[in-house]
Image (cartoon, helix red, strand yellow):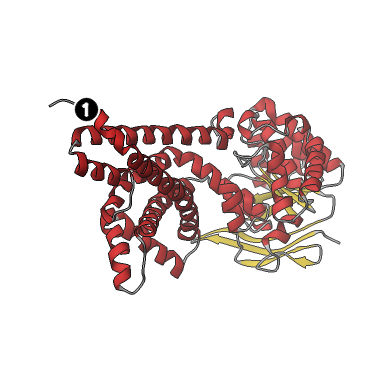
Amino acid sequence: MTLDFSTLLPYSGEIMEGLVTTLWLTVVTTFVGIALAIVVAYVRDLESGIMSRLLGGYVEVVRNTPFIVQLFFLFFGLPALGIPISATVAALVAMILNLGAYTAEILRAGIDSTARGQHEASRALGLSRLQSYRHVVLVPAFSRVYPSLISQCIIVMLGSAVVSQISVFDLTYAANFIQSRNFRGFEVYLVVTLIYLLLAVGMRRSFELVGRRLFAFRQGGSA
Amino acid sequence: MALVSVKDLHKSFGDLEVLKGIDLDIEPGEVVAVIGRSGSGKSTFLRCLNQLEQHDWGTIHLADQRLDGSAMSPGELSQNVGMVFQSFNLFPHKTVVENVMLAPVVVKQTPRAEARKIAEEVLDKVGMLEKVDAYPAQLSGGQQQRVAIARALAMDPKVLLCDEVTSALDPELVGEVLLVLESLAAEGMTLILVTHEMKFARDVSHRVVFMHQGRIHESGDPQTLFTQPKTPELSQFIASVL
């Protein structure tokens, strides 16, 4: 077999389109998913009662079922209930719910390791629980679990390949599409694999860059 | 009239009764040192005064206002009673000035520019003005504790509680913190200090309270108390720490 990458050239538009979809799905999921996790972790850790238990249920369901089933449930299940949902919206919601649940658990580990003295100092200064979470607890908690957070976001980006199964035109869908036309499976998947690899490395680098800014306080010493 | 008035304060942790009825009146501008062995209840007593611990029985009044129970919101309480901790408890992700500004801005809703001015004033008072933009991890223990004192002062409290504020410091850093407390005392700040610094208790405080087994065992002016202890427990304690 001879490799012929020139057979991909006519399909560079499809690859670009897939790449853009994967990118924007990932970026939106990262921001919204982390925001969701911040809320879920607060309610689960610091409040009690029905909301806390409901969100606990959500986290457990997401963490104990396959992503592809969650995706199918949204895309095929909701319309059956009379709630119409497009493939793209189903993909986005599934990814956000997925990242939100995992990140909430990661973040809780960081919150739980907050020193008691930090809570006491903020209480003595008159901060409410929510104010204390926002101003005192959150940033150091994130800084402690940041490496796990980066990995989780990358996992979700890579896992987004699954959305091609409900015909969202992402990078994987583009690869399947091209392969079904030119039958150059090796070339197509090699290129797409490399693109995913670059995306993952690029994400890690960007996160680390942001982290250095956000957690500059750590560079002064062992805090 | 007393600024702080504590009546019949009781506190238990499970079966362990830590405070067995504390009565204490503190005048405005008074510096009171609370001494005693560990386990005597002195830290718990201090923590009840700003409700970090909820007591089981008794009352605490500040000026004429009841402070305990839910009589005061945490926000109000923090503007009346400030606290400095043994382990500083500065917020590691905030610079010195941000640490000091946080409560005025968030709790008191002070405009940022004004809060900054207040922060610089109190930081100047503790001699930390040149470190406004440093992070806590870049400071020595003594410097961190001085910032923690400034942070408490920024809320303009009527009383400042100090819970063994020099116990976590290297010996050579104790002096700078005590100096700050001494200058606050000279300015007329009402201070209640749980301390192991007997020399400081003797030289700076107006009154020393000796706690033993959850009660105020003996109290009086420092000279008399240290030189002529009335109870064997206090003379033993003094002998063991001096």
Name the foreground residue: A177 vs B14: A177
Q: Which residue is mark 1?
A: A4
Residue A49 vertical placement versus B201 (above, below):
below
Name the foreground residue: A217 vs A168: A168
Name the foreground residue: B98 vs B197: B98
Residue at 52% across / 36% down in the picture? Answer: A210
Question: Seen in the image, is B135 located left or right of residue A219?
Answer: right
Give the residue at the far left of this rendering.
A1
Give the residue at the far bottom of this rendering.
A82
Query: Which of the 4 quarters of the picture holds residue A3?
Result: top left
**x%, y% of residue A185?**
19, 37
Residue type for callout 1: Asp
Residue at 66% across / 68% down in the picture? Answer: B70
Under circle 1, the secondary element is loop
Which quarter of the image is occupied by the N terminus of chain A? top left
**x%, y% of residue A174?**
29, 44
Residue B224 appears anywhere in the view: no
Question: Seen in the image, is A146 located left or right of residue A88?
Answer: right
Which quarter of the image is occupied by the C terminus of chain A? top right
**x%, y% of residue B122?**
80, 41
**Neighbourhood count class around disc 1 (C-alpha, 10 Å): few under 14, some 14–19, many 20 upward:** few
Query: To which chain does the residue with label 1 belong?
Result: A
